[in-house]
Image (cartoon, rainbow, N blue to C red):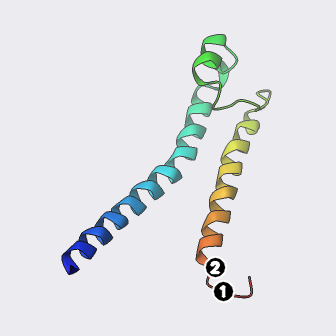
Amino acid sequence: MEQESSVFEQMNNFMFWFFLVLFSAMPLAILVFLCYYFKDLKKQDMIDKYGSIYEGVKLENRSAIIYPLQFILRRYLFAVVSILVSDFIWL
């Protein structure tokens, strides 16, 4: 019985770290992608392929592509704070 819980704990830890790295790296990868292809983002073939990544973002300024990263990071921060401080009764 102890071995089963040990295997479960190992798998749980692995999945935790895997998804933490994946979800942390994704916004940065999207930001790098948008910066690299900034001049091509208004072309129709880029819109057809990758338009859902930057849909709703005004492409007049390069600084506008930081908004999706900021949005995702705020959500991550809220989720982490909600999980870590859930034991405090006064919240």
- Please tell me which residue is depicted at 70% across the width and 37% down the height of the picture: 65
Q: Amino acid at mark 2?
A: Val
- The answer to whether residue 87 is left or right of residue 2 is right
Point out which mark residue 29 bears: none
Q: Residue at x 65, y 71 (%)?
A: 82
Quarter occupied by the N terminus: bottom left
Which element is circle 2 on? Answer: loop
Task: Report the front residue among 38 and 70.
Answer: 70
Residue 26, compared with residue 33, is above or below; it is below
Q: Residue furthest front?
A: 1
Image quarter (top left, top right, bottom left or bottom right) of the C terminus: bottom right
Which residue is label 1 attached to? Answer: 88
Where, by quadrant of the figure, is residue 19 drawn?
A: bottom left
Q: Residues within 10 Å of mark 2 (few under 14, many from 20)?
A: few
- Name the residue that disc number 2 marks: 85
Q: Nearer the viewer, residue 73 or 65?
A: 73
Badge 1 density bin: few <14, some 14–19, many ≥20, Cα 10 Å? few
Quarter occupied by residue 9? bottom left
Image coordinates of residue 25 in percent, x first then y, are 50, 49
Q: Residue furthest top?
A: 44
Task: Give the x, y percent position of residue 24.
Answer: 52, 53
In the image, residue 10 lies at what x, y percent? 29, 68
* Residues at discs 1 and 2 in contact (Cβ within 8 Å): yes
* Residue at image location 59% in from the left, 24% down from the top: 50
Please give the count of numbered marks on the rendered protein.
Answer: 2
Cα distance between the residues tagged 1 and 2: 6 Å
Residue 5 percent location from the top left of the image: 27, 75
Residue visible at 53% across and 41% down? 29
Q: Is residue 28 above or below residue 86?
A: above
Q: Amino acid at mark 1?
A: Phe
| Helix, strand or loop under label 1 | loop
